[in-house]
Amino acid sequence: MFSAIRKFIRNTFLIANKLRIAICLVAWLFYSCFQAATAQVCADPSGGIVFNQTFGTASNPVSITGLTTYEYEPIDCPGDGQYTITSALESDCFNATWYTVATDHTAGDVQGNMLVINGGDKAGLFYQQPVGALCKGTSYEFSMWVLNLLKTGTCLDALIPNLTIRVETTEGLLIQSIDIGQILQTDTPTWRRCSILFTAPESNDEIVVKLINNQGDLGCGNDMLIDDLQVKQCSECVGQPELVYVPDAFTPNNDGVNDTMSVFLQSAASDSFTLKVYNRWGSLIFTSSDPAHKWDGNFAGTPCAVGTYTWEITYKSSSSPKRETVQTGRILLMR
């Protein structure tokens, strides 16, 4: 009889263990699929970055006055419906229910800042970012990194941020929208990338990205970090055949993404193309007569310093081959 009881207990334990493994596997698959479904990315990952918001550094912070509906609070632990911008978070916020986050998300940033959001009592818009100088009718990707600040197991009925990204025209007409869903708690502070694809409108070269939190209850949680808002170009400029377009920044850090200075040409004669790049003192550090030969951020085999560089492009339009056009601009080198 005791042998039968032991066998019954053992079999029950094995069945329960297998059931637990199966439940975990299903949950993992659901979470993975859900995460993938809420991320839209460029088919070509080498597209140039045309907008980059890192919120500055501790010594040179960026103001977002007018971009958020929340109230600014200069301390590191803002209250409900408030925000702050900081380079590090200590662990004593709200009885140590928030994670300690020693650095921002931006790679290689020295005392780089991040946006701290403490969710308010109303669901809705909490941040909006205008982005201009886009190529009309061209595909872009907006992305950002988000971190749920609430430690696991610190409170019952934790409130979880639930985000939506909307891309609109300056007149408020919807271009594209995606429900990111809940920014789930993690056992350690973990950044999550969220993104959306959109096509710039034909009527305007400026759009507005709006971040909406669908969680509007007061309580424990609904707190997050946000960093590295970027808009990346996914395709060559369309609808502007005479335009030579250069993104605002590139990151030659050998990660395989945006490592070179991209130049997008439409209907420009490549055999008459010349690119020159100058440093802040006006010294020529790179030249090319081939659009496929891109600047990799080096000079004489040595990496150039982080900063702004001036470029000059000379080309002849295919529609008017006898007329030479000179276009200049600036590009930010980041690492």
Image (cartoon, rainbow, N blue to C red):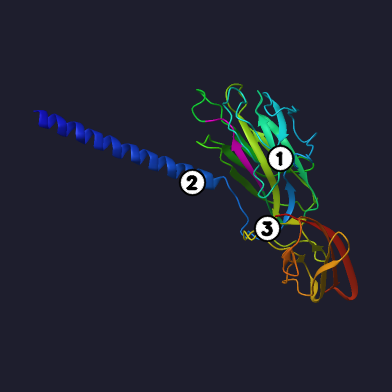
Write the start and end of the magenta stretch as one range. 143-151
Q: Nearer the viewer, mark 1 or mark 2?
A: 1
Where residue 28 appears, as percent x and y from the top left, is 43, 42
Tell me: 314 left or right of 91: right
Q: Nearer the viewer, residue 317 or 127?
A: 127
Residue 5 figure quarter = top left
Query: Residue 156 location in percent, x, y?
Result: 50, 22
Q: Position of residue 114 (x, y in %)?
A: 69, 39
Residue 294 position (above or below residue 306) = below
Residue at 28% in and 35% down: 16
Residue 213 on the magenta segment? no
> Would you name the residue on which mark 3 appears?
234
| Residue at the spot of label 2 | 33
Label 1: which residue? 113
Q: Secondary structure at mark 1?
A: loop
Q: Earlier in the sequence, mark 1 or mark 3?
A: 1
Q: Nearer the viewer, residue 134 or 289?
A: 289
Please provide percent x and percent y for residue 308.
Answer: 81, 56
User: Helix, strand or loop at disc 3?
Assistant: loop
Q: Say whether disc 1 or disc 2 marks the residue closer to the N-terminus.
A: 2
At label 1, the amino acid type is: Asn
Q: Residues within 10 Å of mark 1 (few under 14, many from 20)?
A: many
